[in-house]
Amino acid sequence: MQRRDFLKNAAAFTIGASPCIATGAGPAPLRRANSGRKIAFGAAIDVADIDRPDMVELFKAHCTSLTPRNALKWMTNERVEGRPDYKGADRIADFARSIGCTVYGHTLIWYRVPAWVTAMTDAGELRTAMQQRITRTIRHFAGSVQAWDVVNEPMEYSAARWRDSVFQRLLGLDHIRACFELAHETNQNAQLVLNETHLEKAGPMYDARRSLLLDLIGQLHQQGVPLHCIGLQSHFRPGLDQLDSKALGDFCASLKQMGIGVRITELDGSCRFVSRLGKVDMARTYSAMFSDVVRVAGTRGDLRGVTCWGLAEKYQPAENGATGNCRSRVLPYDDDMRVRPAFGSLMSTIEELNR
Ligand code: XIL
């Protein structure tokens, strides 16, 4: 569908006090409301999405930032040592440029690495490979990627300790500092992010995770390490996770005091545990799930962007524990490309914060 047809099909509707435009399938084009504003809105994109006209219309309508979901991971870019392949990510960068979006780089250093990196046992060899990965990738995308997840998920998922990754095993925790220093030397203009999961939730283990990470950030900050932002992945599991507004707010406020921002980087919901909620209004549950974390980060912290981990469920794989209201991970548009009310709530929350 051409953009003008897409807009022609639009119908007026109202969210809060502001009149918006809605398509038969969706709410107001979010990017119009947010372009040039502090809190950008974006979504993860797969290379295949570029060939899906319905997805292209959604990215055009709502996003000012796109995050390659898998196309900028080391396993994708260098399956064979010394033979970098950025074809997919280049396609995404070209597409982003063609629709006026920036590209958010996910991710330089993550524990999931190509097999030849996992097999390393020598610290010097790993350090060299890590340095090449960072400098080569940042240089390749110097004109198109403005922000990078330099280090992704350095902590174990469900524990308050550093992850037993090949980097941690051979180089120790100092590899995090080294990655940020090198990224900054390679491109002084890029915004550098440490991205982590399970920082938003309630419970003693999550308290301990926030505190472990905050200690490290404090040390890096004192050493003058160029770490500009913390990414809150915000993958939620309704029925299992509770947002801890107070603890997350305090965490974001501590970062703000150090001049460090936050971004919501991978917002979505799992359907695995929703049956535990019993009879509840799922539309409300998802609305709260999408909006509350953004409101906390935006009121207590220096929130710079919100990214959903995809825009539509239609092309996502089915998830274990799927129920009638949710087949794959919950995103702004469902399996039939119908907008979820949660997206309207998210949009008005971002608009409020951007006012
Ligand atoms: C996931 C992708 O969504 C999947 O398509 C892929 O198979 C595995 O990775 N945290 C991250 C993301 O930082 O890179 C992960 O993305 C989801 C969890």
Image (tube, rainbow, N blue to C red):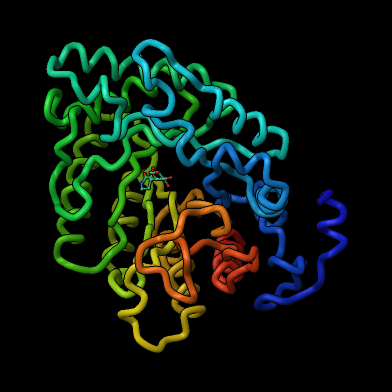
Residue 109, position in %: x, y?
32, 30
In the image, taking residue 199 as reference, residue 284 lies left or right, namely right
- Count every numbered label the image shows and give the total: 0
State the quadrant of the C terminus: bottom right
Asked if residue 249 can be seen in this view, the reply is yes
* Residue at left offset 17%, top offset 45%: 215
Q: Residue 284, relative to residue 345: is it above or below? A: below
Residue 224, position in %: x, y?
28, 30
When asked about the image quadrant of residue 95, the answer is: top right
Query: Where is ligand 1, by quadrant?
Result: top left
Q: Residue 291, relative to residue 317: is it above or below? A: below
* Residue at left offset 65%, top offset 40%: 50
Residue 123, position in %: x, y?
14, 16
Asked if residue 306 can be seen in this view, the reply is no
In the image, taking residue 95 as reference, residue 165 lies left or right, namely left
Of residue 232 and residue 310, the one placed in the foreground of this image is 310
When asked about the image quadrant of residue 349, the answer is: bottom right
Q: Residue 140, relative to residue 105: is it above or below? A: above
Q: Residue 319, relative to residue 94: is it above or below? A: below
* Residue at left offset 13%, top offset 14%: 122
* Residue at left offset 43%, top offset 51%: 266
